[in-house]
């Protein structure tokens, strides 16, 4: 494998040869028109017969079929537990839209240029990045369970962030990674998050390039990646050595199996709460009913408050308040699903809501104005309210029992 670094700072690149296929890996800035122009110029030269891009199928689809969100089945999203992933996708789109509006920059323009030039020249587009959902799930699984609320907080901070993007964030994007910049709370949290978010993707993209080279279908591939991945991919190509690329891809595509014991925690909490009720009633029926009242008011009240913050329909607020004390004692169903389903039934999103979803969620107030995104907020905020209420009510019950 030969390698040569090009000194030009605007478009750093290196060349390598794998299995007889020459590969030029071009590092680009995600917010630079110069990078987009460089990609177009290289592909128009006729030197390449394929282009590889730092995109996964989902992100590629968002570029070539931006209206797919308008065909989203909201009930299916709720039922399959995909609310966090849809919210993450909208957060990424919102961040990109704010960049475009504030600085007149289209983030990922170099990827669009690569796709468009390849289409015009009838060249294949090779998607070499790992699926974004897998990456975020590996981030989630890579941290201890008690710190996962930080991930949720980081995601919500990205969703609810200020509408102005700072110059520092622009500079990070010039040399960094779109996902890292969007979910900056994730990347800065710890090495455990940086590894699946950045380092693993370096190895994944290196392995995908080796796969395409091994097929011997192409003479010269142009790989367009963010400048922040350039050094990592170069090192990964050296480190992977004799490990089959398909094996690397398969390993990095796997979701780490979740530990079994954290799944027992909700059931343990239920057992403790019910035991508390039983002890209370055995001591004094009045005490028992006081414990039940505390549970209903605290758990239901905080879930209802979450619905209020999400500007849910009054009936949805009442539904959340009534359902939370019951769903918290049945971990197989969450109050978020119940409340979001009720909100969807009461305020059915229109075709216009779906078509405006990406545009509306680029603004903070738009999350409450669009009926689709408001349903997502109802799900998230009622779930969070009930979770806090479960622990707060549990401590209150313990306090009454120990003090009685």
Image (cartoon, rainbow, N blue to C red):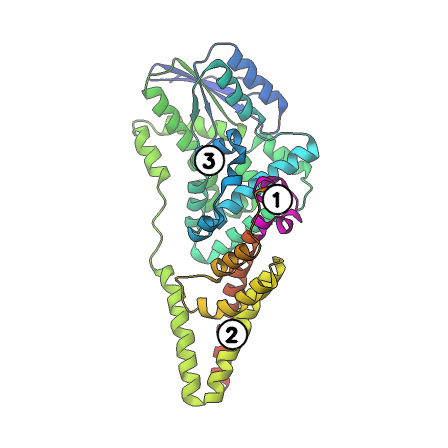
Query: Which residue occupies the foreground of this view, 289 or 21?
Result: 289
Local secondary structure at mark 1: loop
Query: Which residue occupies the foreground of this view, 117 or 184?
Result: 117
Query: Which residue occupies the foreground of this view, 69 or 190?
Result: 69
**Residue bearing the label numbered 2:** 296
Neighbour tally class for label 1: few under 14, some 14-19, many 20 plus, Cα within 10 Å: many
Q: How far across and down, in percent of the image, does residue 154 sit? A: 55, 49
Q: Residue at x 49, y 67 (%)?
A: 323
Local secondary structure at mark 2: helix
- Identify whether 316 is placed above or below 90: below
Which of disc 2 and disc 3 is earlier in sequence?
Answer: 3
- Identify whether 256 is placed above or below 263: above
Question: Do residues under tags 1 and 3 come within 8 Å of each other at their CB atoms?
Answer: no
Q: Is residue 248 magenta?
A: no
- Identify whether 142 is placed above or below 14: below
Q: Residue at x 38, y 27 (%)?
A: 208
**Residue bearing the label numbered 3:** 58
Q: How far across and down, in percent of the image, does residue 153 sit? A: 55, 53
Marks 2 and 1, how far apart in space? 34 Å
**Residue bearing the label numbered 1:** 361
Q: Residue furthest top?
A: 46
What segment carries the magenta color? 353-374
Local secondary structure at mark 3: helix
Is residue 402 among the parts visible in the rendering? no
Question: Do residues under tags 3 and 2 come within 8 Å of each other at their CB atoms?
Answer: no
Is residue 27 among the parts visible in the rendering? yes
């Amino acid at each position: 494998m030969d390698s040569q670094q090009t000194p030009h700072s605007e478009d750093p690149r290196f060349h390598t040869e794998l299995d007889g296929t020459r590969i030029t890996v071009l590092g680009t800035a995600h917010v630079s028109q110069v990078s987009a122009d460089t990609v177009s110029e290289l592909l128009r030269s006729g030197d390449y017969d394929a282009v590889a891009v730092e995109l996964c199928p989902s992100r590629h689809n968002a570029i070539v079929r931006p209206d797919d969100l308008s065909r989203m089945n909201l009930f299916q999203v709720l039922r399959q537990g995909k609310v966090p992933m849809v919210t993450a996708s909208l957060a990424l789109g919102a961040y990109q839209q704010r960049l475009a509006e504030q600085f007149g920059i289209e983030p990922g323009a170099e990827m669009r240029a690569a796709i468009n030039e390849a289409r015009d020249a009838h060249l294949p587009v090779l998607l070499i990045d790992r699926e974004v959902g897998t990456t975020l799930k590996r981030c989630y699984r890579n941290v201890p369970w008690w710190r996962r609320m930080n991930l949720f907080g980081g995601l919500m901070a990205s969703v609810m962030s200020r509408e102005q993007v700072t110059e520092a964030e622009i500079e990070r994007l010039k040399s960094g990674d779109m996902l890292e910049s969007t979910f900056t709370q994730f990347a800065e949290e710890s090495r455990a998050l940086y590894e699946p978010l950045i380092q693993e993707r370096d190895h994944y993209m290196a392995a995908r390039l080796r796969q395409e080279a091994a097929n011997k279908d192409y003479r010269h591939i142009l790989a367009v990646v963010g400048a922040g991945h350039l050094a990592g991919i170069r090192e990964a190509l050296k480190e992977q050595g004799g490990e089959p690329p398909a094996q690397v891809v398969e390993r990095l595509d796997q979701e780490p199996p979740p530990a079994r014991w954290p799944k027992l925690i909700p059931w343990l909490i239920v057992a403790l709460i019910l035991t508390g009720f039983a002890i209370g009633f055995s001591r004094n029926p009045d005490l028992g009913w006081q414990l039940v009242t505390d549970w209903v008011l605290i758990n239901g009240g905080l879930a209802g408050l979450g619905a209020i913050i999400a500007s849910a329909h009054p009936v949805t607020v009442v539904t959340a308040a009534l359902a939370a004390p019951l769903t918290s004692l049945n971990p197989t169903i969450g109050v978020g699903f119940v409340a979001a389903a009720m909100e969807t039934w009461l305020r059915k999103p229109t075709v216009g809501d779906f078509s405006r979803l990406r545009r509306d969620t680029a603004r903070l107030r738009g999350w409450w104005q669009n009926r689709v995104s408001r349903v997502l907020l109802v799900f998230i905020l009622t779930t969070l309210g009930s979770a806090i209420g479960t622990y707060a009510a549990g401590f209150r019950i313990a306090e009454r029992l120990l003090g009685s």
